[in-house]
Image (cartoon, rainbow, N blue to C red):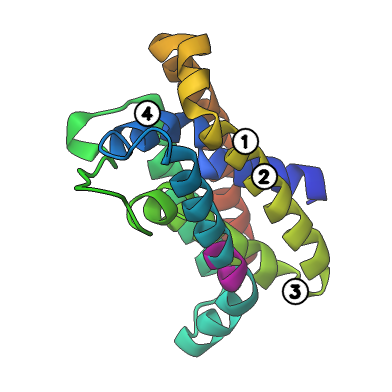
Amino acid sequence: MTIPSAAFLLFLVMDPLGNVPLFLSSLKSVDPARQRQVVARELVIAYGILVAFLFAGHWLLRLLQVSEPALTIAGGIVLFLIALRMVFPSPEWTLHESVEGEPFVVPLAIPYVAGPSALATVVLLMSREPRRWPEWLAALTAAWLASAVILILASQLRRYLGQKGLIALERLMGLVLVAVAVQMFLEGMRVAL
C-alpha cells in the first residue's frame, strides 16, 4: 500500500463528510464564536489518540496474542459494518450522541474522528509493515489534515452542499469503503488459509 492509498483509506474511514451533521449537532449548544476552537481542540486530541494507536497498537495485539490475519479479517468486518451504516443509515444504528454543554473528547474526538474503524486501520497498517512507520504516520497526518479542514469548515460546507449533497457524498464514500472492507476480509482469509 502506498502513502496516498493509505491516506485515502484513512480519510474514508474517518468519514469527515458523514461527521459534518454529527459535529454541527453536537456543537449547537456551544457559542458560535467558540465552535472552531472546540473543533480544533477535539481534532488535535483525536490525532494524538490515532498516533498513539499507530505506535502502540501492535504491542497491544502481541499482548493479546491476536494474529495479523485475525486483525485483517476483524478490520474488514468492522469497516464493512461502518460502510453499511453510511450507505443505509438507520435511526437505530446512528452514532449521534446528545451533548450537554461543550463537548470534550467524547463524542467529537472519540468516536467521531478516532472511531473503532480508524483505530483498527492504523493498527493494521503498522502491524503489517512496522518498518514503514514514517509512511504510515505521513498517511495518517494527510488524512487527518483533510478531515480537519472539512470539519472546521463544517457549517460553510453544509451551506454550500446542502444536506442532500452531504448525504450523497457520504453514501458514495460508503460504497467505496464497502469494496475496501471486502478486500481486507479476503486478504485476511487468504493469509489465514
The three-letter code of the residue at mark 2 reads: Leu
- Categorize mark 1 by other alpha carbons within 10 Å: few (<14), some (14-19), many (20+): few
Residue 120 rendering spot, x and y as whole percentages: 51, 61
Which residue range is magenta in the image?
A: 49-53
Q: Which of marks 1 and 3 is nearer the N terminus?
A: 3
Instruction: Inspect the magenta stretch and tell me whether residue 84 lies in it.
Output: no
Q: Which amino acid does label 4 sit on?
A: Pro
Circle 2 crowding by C-alpha within 10 Å: few under 14, some 14–19, many from 20: some
Label 3 element class? helix
Circle nearer the N terminus (1, 4): 4
- Answer whether labels 2 and 1 touch (C-beta < 8 Å): yes
Percent of width and height locating residue 109? 43, 54
Q: Residue 21 sits in which quadrant?
A: top left
Whether residue 61 is visible, yes or no, is yes
From the viewer's perspective, is residue 157 above or below residue 120? above
Residue 130: image tag = 3
Tell which circle, 3 or 4, labels the residue nearer the N-terminal end.
Answer: 4
Other residues around mark 4 within 10 Å, as few (<14) / some (14–19) / many (≥20): some
